[in-house]
Each structure stands twice: as C-alpha cells, then as structure tokens.
Image (cartoon, helix red, strand yellow):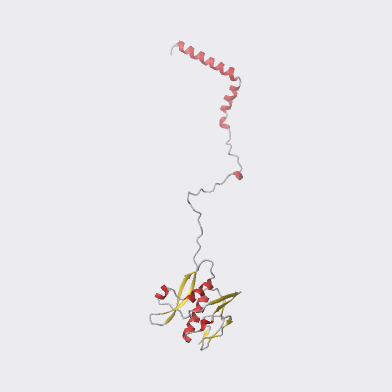
C-alpha cells in the first residue's frame, strides 16, 4: 500500500470518530461500558418460585383412547346329574357366567330350573327337577335366606328322584352363598316333609338335611 493511501485511511478513521462523537456524544462511552458487562446479566428464569412451575400433562396420540378397567368375569356353580363310566349316578357341576346386575344365588337357581343346555346334555347331564317348577321368591333377612319354589318341585318321580332334586338344590344353593342359612319353602310355607312318600327335611339346608 502506498504512503498516500495510508494517509487517506487515517484521515477517514479520524473523520468517522469525530462524526460518531458529534452524533452520540458521551453515550458512546456508556454503550461500550454496557457491552463490556453484558456477561453479568442474570438468567431471568433463575429465581422463579417452584410454585409457579407448570407441569404439562402427557399429550395423547391422535385416536388414542383412555384405558378402561376390565371387570373380572363372575360365574355361578350349578349341579346337575350324570352317569359315570360304571353307570352310577353322580352330581355334575357346571359353570354359567353371571350377567351384569344379576343376583348370584337368584341367577344360579333360575339356571338350575332351566336344566342343562344342549352342550351339557351332550356330555350326559340331566336334571330331576320338574320342568314346571318356578322360583317364586328369594327372601334374605340377615344371615337367613328363604328360597320359595312352586309346589311343582315336589311332584313326579319316586323317592330317588326327589332325593336327587333336593341334593341338586342344596349343592347349588350352598355353592353360591357365603355361610348363609338356607331354608326351602313351597308356595310360601316351610317344608318339613317332601314327596308322596314323605322324605324328611332338616332345615336350614345342608348336605345332611335328608332322611330317607
């Protein structure tokens, strides 16, 4: 670079300096000094109280559904009759799913009166309870439960048939209650004897309630 060019550059720098000083005056010194202290500025988020912190909920993906609790299925135990491999009579326990809102014992007794379904019949299940028998009422008072059937329950068949139907009722009732005292009524009256030959019934019902 020539000597003349250097002189021109120096003159330009001097002119620029005086132009800035003339325009901003002493403010230029403040600007420079502030720029020097810029690293001392505190983070404005540093002293925010924890109470003001916002917790964001997880964002659900489009179409994502709320998880619902799956209710566990409940079943009743019902006792029918069948024959074993030696043609001896046995009590056959089957399960039925309880519809929502149904009383457990009431539903079990209604299904007992219906008798075995097609699938259960295919495995040899049958019932000694007369088809015309109706459940009139179930009355529960504290620890006592009264099962009131129509009198059709005691008609038809001999002693063995009546004994078997009573045991179907007893086993089904005990399997679907929790340590309750169960009594059998027919047409609104407590039963002490049942059938034409008069099988004695000891109440409340249990596995030893019948005397033949």
Q: Tally the marks.
A: 0
Nearer to the camera, 177 or 8:
177
Nearer to the camera, 62 or 67:
62
Q: Is residue 17 above or below residue 212?
A: above
Q: In this view, does 59 lie above or below 47?
A: below
- Residue 172: horizontal and vertical position, in percent? 50, 76
- Residue 173: horizontal and vertical position, in percent? 52, 76
Location of residue 94 by image quarter = bottom left
Q: Quadrant of the N terminus?
A: top left
- Residue 114: horizontal and vertical position, in percent? 48, 75
Outermost residue, top side: 4
Outermost residue, front side: 132
Q: Is residue 174 above or below residue 15?
A: below
Q: In this view, does 84 lie above or below 57?
A: below
Outermost residue, bottom side: 197
For image coordinates 46% across by 72% down, the residue present is: 95
For image coordinates 49% across by 14% down, the residue present is: 9
- Residue 171: horizontal and vertical position, in percent? 50, 78
């Amino acid at each position: 670079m020539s000597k003349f060019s250097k002189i021109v550059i120096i003159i330009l720098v001097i002119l620029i300096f005086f132009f800035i000083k003339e325009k901003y005056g002493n403010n230029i010194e403040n600007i420079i000094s502030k720029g020097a202290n810029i690293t001392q500025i505190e983070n404005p988020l540093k002293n925010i109280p924890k109470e003001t912190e916002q917790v964001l909920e997880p964002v659900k993906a489009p179409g994502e559904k709320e998880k619902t609790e799956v209710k566990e299925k409940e079943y009743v135990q019902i006792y029918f009759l069948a024959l074993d491999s030696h043609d001896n009579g046995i009590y056959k326990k089957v399960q039925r799913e309880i519809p929502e809102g149904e009383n457990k014992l009431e539903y079990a007794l209604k299904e007992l009166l219906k008798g075995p379904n097609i699938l259960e019949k295919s495995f040899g299940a049958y019932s000694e309870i007369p088809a015309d028998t109706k459940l009139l009422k179930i009355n529960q008072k504290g620890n006592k439960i009264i099962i009131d059937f129509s009198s059709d329950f005691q008609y038809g068949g001999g002693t063995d048939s009546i004994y078997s139907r009573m045991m179907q009722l007893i086993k089904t009732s005990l399997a679907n209650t929790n340590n309750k005292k169960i009594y059998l009524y027919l047409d609104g009256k407590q039963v002490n004897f049942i059938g034409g030959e008069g099988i004695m019934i000891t109440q409340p019902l249990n596995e030893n309630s019948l005397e033949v």
